Amino acid sequence: MSTTHEDIPVGVRAGVPAGPRDDVSGATPSSSLKELIDTRLHMPFPARRNPHEPAAAAGVQAWLTAWGLTDDPGVSAMIARTRPAELASRTSPAVDQGLLQIVANQIAYQFVFDDRAEDVGRRSPGALLPMLCESVSVLCDGAPPSTPLGASLADLYRQVRERCTPAQAARWAAKSREYVHGLLYEAVAQAHSGALRTADCTSIRSLTAGVEPFFPLYEAAQPHEVPDAELHHPVVQRLSGLSANAAVWTADLFSAVKEQRAGEMINLALAHQRESRCSLQTAVVMAIGEINDTIEEVRKLCAEIEPELSPAGVGYARGVIGWIRGCYDWSRTVPRYADVTSVPAVP
């Protein structure tokens, strides 16, 4: 069975010439898809960067090298294109240097793990089981790793345990296991693309995004523990889920061209394109509408819940929503997604 979706050319409705229904209002024939995104996306949160970013960048490189992950030249090239320390800096602008380093190391690890899982899973979902089971064993039982990738995860887990309370570290491990499981779902979806609906795509994307494993680190960033009643408050829980979705869906807008060319499936814009059989530009506009609605709900929920929260709770909530603006600023400039500038805004 093919592991790639049907070939729908950029800018063309599948089987139907692009026409008036391609709603790319505000775009001009000379503008790019990137400019269309910038014009249509509503981003009310301020852009910020962490002052410790240069140190985090050096630390990431040293950490990856220490665990043998950059022995593969492809990994070094990928890290140069993805700039994990920059993503850490933009999403986590208020954390201290030590915590920023953990965030940056975790982002780098997830990039390496995700790309390797994608490569292996494309050949066969079952072939993913050894690396996924190793990760789960490390996270569940503290089992000794047998590969450099597993060893780097074990060291990352050590860093988290040293910085976080036992409860925070347990939440980090649980969310990290969800991320691992999500990669298996993604591989199965790639192998059986004909049955994949937009709702299925967004469910899988919420796991493979790997955003929520970072949230316990924002608990650890507070001067006092976030009270359980606040952490598990339904509004705070919804705020966390919406923020993770908005962050990764925003990245999907800028990565859609790259991922379409690579035959990837789990992307919000590409899911809309398959389901609506429209141009990529129209699908991106549809996805932007969904993201804008989500961001507006996040904004309203923040205004509703912050007066009820302790200072630690407010700091945690703001740390969580920092991923939205951070992912946007990183995605629009990172070399990994530069293809978005090569596609016109108008089909």
Image: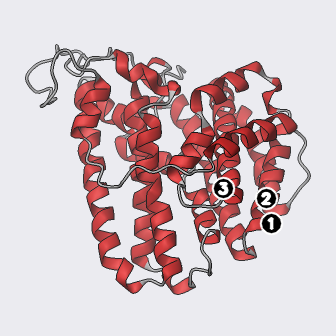
> In the rendered structure, which amino acid carries the disc numbered 3?
Ser
Query: Which residue in the structure is indicated by mark 1?
Result: 162
Q: Is residue 277 visible?
A: no
Report the amino acid beneath label 1.
Glu
Q: Do the CB atoms of the residues marked 2 and 1 lie less than 8 Å apart?
A: yes
Q: Percent x, y for residue 346? A: 19, 20
Residue denoted by label 3: 176
User: Which residue is identified by label 2?
Assistant: 159
Residue 336 versus residue 212: which sits nearer the camera?
Answer: 336
Q: What is the C-alpha distance between the residues marked 3 and 1?
A: 17 Å
The residue sitting at 42% across, 77% down in the picture is 234
Above or below: residue 150 compared with residue 123: below
Residue at the image point whose x is 86% and y is 60% from the top: 142
Nearest to viewer (mark 2 / mark 3)? 2
Determine the secondary structure under disc 1: helix
Location of the C terminus (image quadrant): top left
